[in-house]
Image: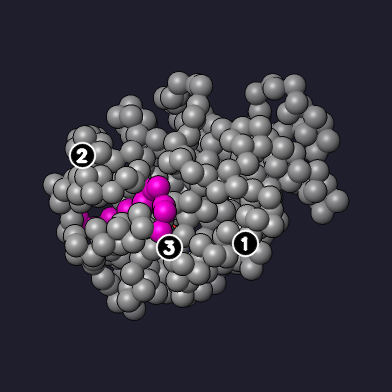
Amino acid sequence: MNSFQDSLQSLSTGSPPNEEQITALLSANAEQMPALLSAADKARRRGVGDAVHLRAIIEFSNYCRKNCLYCGLRRDNRSLTRYRLTEQQILDAAGEAAALGFRTVVLQSGEDLYYTPTVIARIIERVKNKYDLAVTLSLGEHSRQTYKTWREAGADRYLIKQETADEQLFKRLKPDTSLSRRVQCLCWLGELGYQTGSGNMVGLPGQSLHTLARDILLMRKLDVDMAGIGPFLPHPATPLKNAAPGNLELTLKTLAITRLYLPQTHLPATTALCTLAKDGRRLALSGGANVIMPNLTPPAVRDKYLIYPQKADIGEKPARALADITALLADLGRPLAGDRGHAVKNKPMAYPELA
Ligand code: 5AD
Ligand code: SF4
């Protein structure tokens, strides 16, 4: 049995992590938390520096063909008013992001086949031709060929979260797919030259500290360039409406430990974390995070991309959000990154077998 102290110390030896060590770190009590967060903050400075990267999110459709048990966009949620932005509206939102000084846009939607691969490719090309922006896609599971088409159209990065590394739990929560398919997608994306992003939810019903430890090990094995870690928040129009929300401290611990084991990976202060706690952004940036993802979805539809309730960025105006971020970063003594913020990694992409 590893103790918290032993596990923290073994980090400095550079020995590869194991599940027991990570579980011991996840068990840190209130007295041990500051040491963990401060170790993560140091690892963040060494691994990715002080600069904080901004990514503008454009949520262009809330239609989804999948039925994940935790998500408000699930296809069986008939109480949600669905919307789709036109190609021009998406381009205009990207233009607004560029005008505000963003260097990356994240095009995000539910799995909505209304936009064919060709249409998405055209949108990517138009954004890339018109603006000096890196394009990140977050459009769920598609074929290798589709990912290839989008990469050739100019897409730079792709986010597709593993959600949970527990195969059985994954199948229960995402009945339309499987963990191995998800990992397959991440591997294809890496092979095609995308920078890849995964991530998980903390506090899913049925999850244990061991599951979270396996989440971190899987993200390390996949050598992801980005990992979004946020609490599970129950949505009233989903089968998990009565489940308890994820815990703030456990989410911060998971983020901190992920930083310790993936020192060069971009870790955002997720919107879910900011929804759970008012000072979530500050806490995350002080405990391993180095990315903020403000919402640039047009205000008319913003409140309809409701994956969980009271999403923190619903009423936020981009200029106001940027002013808040500037003030927070000044307070933390952290600069805004001026470049596109591609992850710089020395290691080659790994192609894991699922154990
Ligand atoms: N609570 C927290 N995060 C959620 N997501 C979806 N539903 C929830 C929820 N209820 C996250 C998942 C998914 C992304 C669309 O949003 O991690 O990848
Ligand atoms: Fe669709 Fe993603 Fe929500 Fe699942 S988590 S229902 S795939 S938007």
Neighbour class for label 1 at 10 Å: few (<14), some, many (≥20)? few
Query: What kind of colouring is applied to the model shown?
Result: one colour
Instruction: Identify the disc placed on residue 327.
Output: 1
Tell me which label, 2 or 3, sits earlier in the chain.
Answer: 2
Instruction: Identify the disc placed on residue 295.
Output: 3
Residue depicted at 37% across the width and 68% down the height = 305
Instruction: Identify the disc placed on residue 268.
Output: none
Residue 111 belongs to magenta span: yes
Under mark 3, the amino acid is Asn
Residue depicted at 76% across the width and 43% down the height = 38
Residue 301 position in % (x across, y down): 33, 73
Residue 333 horizontal side relative to residue 131, left or right: right
Indicate whether 277 appears above or below 146.
below
Over which residues does the magenta segment extend?
100-113
Q: Quadrant of residue 193?
A: top left
Residue 22 horizontal side relative to residue 166, left or right: right
Q: Quadrant of residue 148?
A: top left
Compute the Cα span from label 2 to label 3.
Answer: 24 Å
Residue depicted at 46% across the width and 60% down the height = 294
Residue topped by disc 2: 153
- The secondary structure type at the circle numbered 2 is loop
Which residue is at the front of the view, 104 or 234?
Answer: 104
